[in-house]
Image: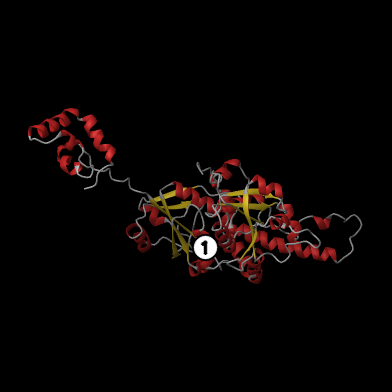
Amino acid sequence: MEYESSSSIWDGVYYHPHLFGGLMLTAALLGLSTSYFGGLGYSYLPYMWSDLGVFYKKKSEKKRIRVYMDGCFDLMHYGHANALRQAKALGDELVVGVVSDEEIVANKGPPVLSMEERLALVSGLKWVDEVIANAPYAITEKFMNSLFNEHKIDYIIHGDDPCLLPDGTDAYALAKKAGRYKQIKRTEGVSSTDIVERILSSLKDAKACENHDNTSPLPGDDHKGSQSNSSCISQFLPTSRRIVQFSNGKGPGPNARVVYIDGAFDLFHAGHVEILRSARQLGDFLLVGIHTDQIVSEHRGKGHPIMHLHERSLSVLACSYVDEVIIGAPWEVTRDMVTTFNISLVVHGTVAESNSLLAGEPDPYAVPKSMGIFWMLDSPKNTTTTSVAQRIVANHEAYVKRNAKKAESEKKYYAEKVHVSGD
């Protein structure tokens, strides 16, 4: 039998003074010293008086609600992160199922990211407690029973957008029938389908720019080359509330070792997660600088970034290794920045985009290097934004077909969309 702390012993004395007095009198009549009695160790008293009802059995802990949400999580973005944030808010522990490559191919088309990469991205989110690899695309009766009995899941969560199988049936029909289904609000303005389209369109823009540079402009055509041909403009509308929801809301302690790392963090991928994990291990507080869209475009060329500043900032903020971000960080790390944020160490990964430095431009890390606080950090992975985009290019036809199929369901969703409260 477990008991409360020693303070509750004297709570019993306070609330039952007559009973305590009776015990003291009995002890005196038996020839026991009251001073000896009062000096009995706390560890002994509960066993002596527990049957008298003076002390109370330790309260049982409240049952922790475990919720489950699954997904492909291919080309992980802030919409995925926000869905998992909402799911976590419906319980105490969030278990996430990552759908297998085979199931994705059968139901949606080829995935861009491998299972290993998708697991790294999901595991790296601040709201995720457990991950189940190779989850089925549809909630079958066998898998649902496994969730309820083995994983102790209380509720299965999904967004308000329909998830249909190839035969047109609802992938979550069984969970709904069992009364163990809860719905969250879909994050507007982004989807994996949208990101693939942005990547394909950015390549068209880059080729158009190259063709323009190799030909003489026609009269009155001076500005056409500087305009984007992309029709895929982000529909995301950033709000201060969303940033607060993703933020830790805590600053570094007075003696914290603050580590700073900066970059574009475009198409947030497993390489980003691993470098942020390594950087966080070097200190107590990880501050991440997110470069502006203009800076990224200047250093990476036409069609970049794929994701705009606020989208990239939310993706980084969602990472469990990140404590704070600078939204729109400057290209150069200045002495004033180091002082303002009390930065102890500035790090940069060994793997970066090949065209990340303009010819003749000063070293952006000259100041921290001169201060002896700069460190080149070995990148755990060779993945870059460009390498991820090239996978889509290499399978161009497959992804165009996949997007065309998905675009129809997206169009239908928005046509039939109704307001869902909460997020």
Taking the image as shown, residue 238 lies to the left or right of residue 154, namely: right
Q: Provide residue 165's location: percent of width, then percent of height.
A: 48, 62
Q: Residue 400, located in which quarter of the rendered image?
A: bottom right
Q: Position of residue 373 (x, y in %)?
A: 65, 56
Q: Which sits in the foreground, 96 or 111?
A: 96
Mark 1 nearby-residue class (10 Å; few <14, some 14–19, many ≥20):
some
Give amino acid for label 1: Ala
Q: Which residue is mark 1?
A: 120
In this rendering, position of residue 264 left or right of residue 28 = right
Q: Evaluate whether residue 59 shows in this view.
A: yes
Q: Residue at x 71, y 49 (%)?
A: 335
Residue furthest toward the left? Answer: 30
Q: Nearer the viewer, residue 341 or 194?
A: 341
Give the total of numbered labels: 1
Residue 60 position (above or below residue 355): above
Outermost residue toward the bottom in this view: 394
Left or right: 330 as drawn, with respect to 246: right
Query: In the image shown, does 209 or 407 lie closer to the viewer?
Result: 209
The image quarter containing residue 219 is bottom right
Residue at the image point whose x is 61% and y is 42% from the top: 239
